[in-house]
């Protein structure tokens, strides 16, 4: 297994739709193992393949279930259904999220409170996940990555402008295109 560099916003792979996985090959199995290792070290609660430079519809996640037990897995070729988000402005304390591809930053974003994700796991077995709350947020965030959407593409205009300033100042998308957990200290 290997820790992979995580692409930073501005890298084209993060801003284009990813392709469905055909056959689950050894390469795919290695990729998923490396994604888990990278996510855990970052640390993060989710990681999508485009974030490590691979334009495939795969993401991994790791959080807790309702009993506080580990909840983790991989989803290949996911589909996502959700109830409409509640109207209104997000609460910065309760509804702020971050992204390993926008390292060190958090911004509020209203999300749907309940989703269903279907797809297959690494064994090719169909999976169906019904979750709410923070786990629903993780699913929406990671699914977006597969469509080339970052959460900062969804935040309000003022925050979006702040992100652009931060990106410019730090050279994201120009001189700085990735960071590596365990090597660079953005999130850890
Ligand atoms: Ni992200």
Image: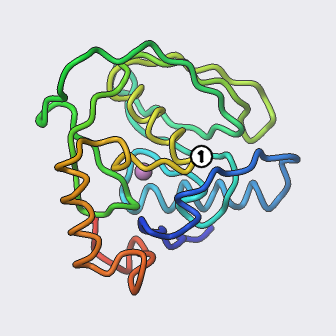
Query: Where 31 sits versus 130, above or below?
Result: below
Identify whether 44 is placed above or below 95.
Answer: below
Expressed as whole percent of the image width and height from the top left, the position of residue 26 reads 83, 58
Residue beneath the point at 63% across and 56% down:
33
Q: Which one is in front, 41 or 177?
A: 177
> With 167 as the anchor, is 124 left or right in this view?
right
- Give the quadrant of residue 97: top left
Along the viewing direction, whichever of 80 and 131 lies nearer the viewer: 80
On the rendered image, what quadrant is the N terminus found in?
bottom right
Residue 180 x %, y %:
43, 75
Seen as rendered, the residue at the extreme bottom is 175
Left or right, residue 117 beside residue 100 = right
Q: Is residue 121 left or right of residue 188?
A: right
Q: For label 1, count other residues whose C-alpha is less than 10 Å away and answer few (under 14), some (14-19) or many (20+).
A: many
Q: Number of numbered discs present? A: 1
x then y, percent, for residue 45 = 40, 45
Query: Which quadrant is home to the C terminus?
Result: bottom left
Where residue 13 appears, as percent x and y from the top left, is 59, 64
Is residue 145 depicted above or below 108 in this figure?
Answer: below
Q: Residue at x 72, y 61 (%)?
A: 30
- Residue under the point 60% across and 62% down: 34
> Helix, strand, or loop for circle 1?
helix
Residue at left offset 68%, top offset 24%: 127
The answer to which quarter of the image holds residue 129 is top right
Task: Check the image and tell me how it is coloured.
Answer: rainbow
Does the closest atom of ligand 1 sit within 8 Å of the Cβ of label 1? no
Toward the viewer: 92 or 68? 92
For mark 1, what is the residue?
146
């Amino acid at each position: 297994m290997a820790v992979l560099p995580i692409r930073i916003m501005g890298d084209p792979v993060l801003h284009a739709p990813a392709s469905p996985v055909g056959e689950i090959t050894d390469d795919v199995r290695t990729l998923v193992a490396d994604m888990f290792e990278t996510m855990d070290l970052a640390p993060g609660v989710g990681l999508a393949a485009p974030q490590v430079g691979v334009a495939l519809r795969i993401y991994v996640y790791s959080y807790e279930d309702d009993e506080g037990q580990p909840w983790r897995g991989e989803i290949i070729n996911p589909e996502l259904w959700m109830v409409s988000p509640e109207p209104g402005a997000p609460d910065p304390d309760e509804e702020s999220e971050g992204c390993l591809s926008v390292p060190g930053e958090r911004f509020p974003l209203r999300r749907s409170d309940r989703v269903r994700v279907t797809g297959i796991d690494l064994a090719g077995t169909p999976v169906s996940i019904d979750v709410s709350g923070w786990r629903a947020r993780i699913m929406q965030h990671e699914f977006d990555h597969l469509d080339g959407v970052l959460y900062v593409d969804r935040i309000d205009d003022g925050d979006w402008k702040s992100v652009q300033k931060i990106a410019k100042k730090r050279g994201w998308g120009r001189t700085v295109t990735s960071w590596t957990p365990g090597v660079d200290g953005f999130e850890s």
